[in-house]
């Protein structure tokens, strides 16, 4: 009975198998495509947030202000694998800047001084 079910619906199983293979290959490609970018891409490995105790006032509404220290690893360019230490500032409402999350991939713009 089971064998007859598989022989009757074998094309559906082949289609399902091919869809799973395409999905897995697409996921692997998307997760590892940093080499395709010219801009530096970094993966955030650690973040530390500090409340600066300053408040931003806009239209008589108060918002907490935070300072964030970020550690990241470059995934491409000639400095691939190099660890970076960055700083960022954001507000709790995220109205001005968003905070960086551990594990996130971000494209960074480099400035030369």
Image: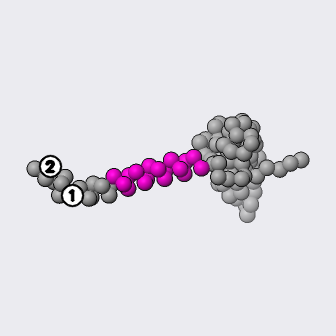
The residue wearing badge 1 is 9
Can the viewer see residue 64 in this picture? no
In the displayed structure, would residue 6 be above or below residue 78?
Answer: below
Please tell me whether residue 25 belongs to the stretch shown in magenta. yes
Front in this rendered view, residue 12 or 97: 12
Q: Is residue 19 left or right of residue 80?
A: left
Image quadrant in which you'd find residue 52: top right
Q: Residue at x 66, y 43 (%)?
A: 75
Please tell me whether residue 13 belongs to the stretch shown in magenta. no
Q: CA distance from mark 2 to mark 1?
A: 10 Å
Tag shown at residue 41: none
The residue wearing badge 2 is 3
Reading the chain from its start, which is encountered first: label 2 or label 1? 2
**Which stretch appears magenta?**
17-33
In the displayed structure, would residue 67 be above or below residue 13?
Answer: above
Q: Is residue 18 left or right of residue 92?
A: left
């Amino acid at each position: 009975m089971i064998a007859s079910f598989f022989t009757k619906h074998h094309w559906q199983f082949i289609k399902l198998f091919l869809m799973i293979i395409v999905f897995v290959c697409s996921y692997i490609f998307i997760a590892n495509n940093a080499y395709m970018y010219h801009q530096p891409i970094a993966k955030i490995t650690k973040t530390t947030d500090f409340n600066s105790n300053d408040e931003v006032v806009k239209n008589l509404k108060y918002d907490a202000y935070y300072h964030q220290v970020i550690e990241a690893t470059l995934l491409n360019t000639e400095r691939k694998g190099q660890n970076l230490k960055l700083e960022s500032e954001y507000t709790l409402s995220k109205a001005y800047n968003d905070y960086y999350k551990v594990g996130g991939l971000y494209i960074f713009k480099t400035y030369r001084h």
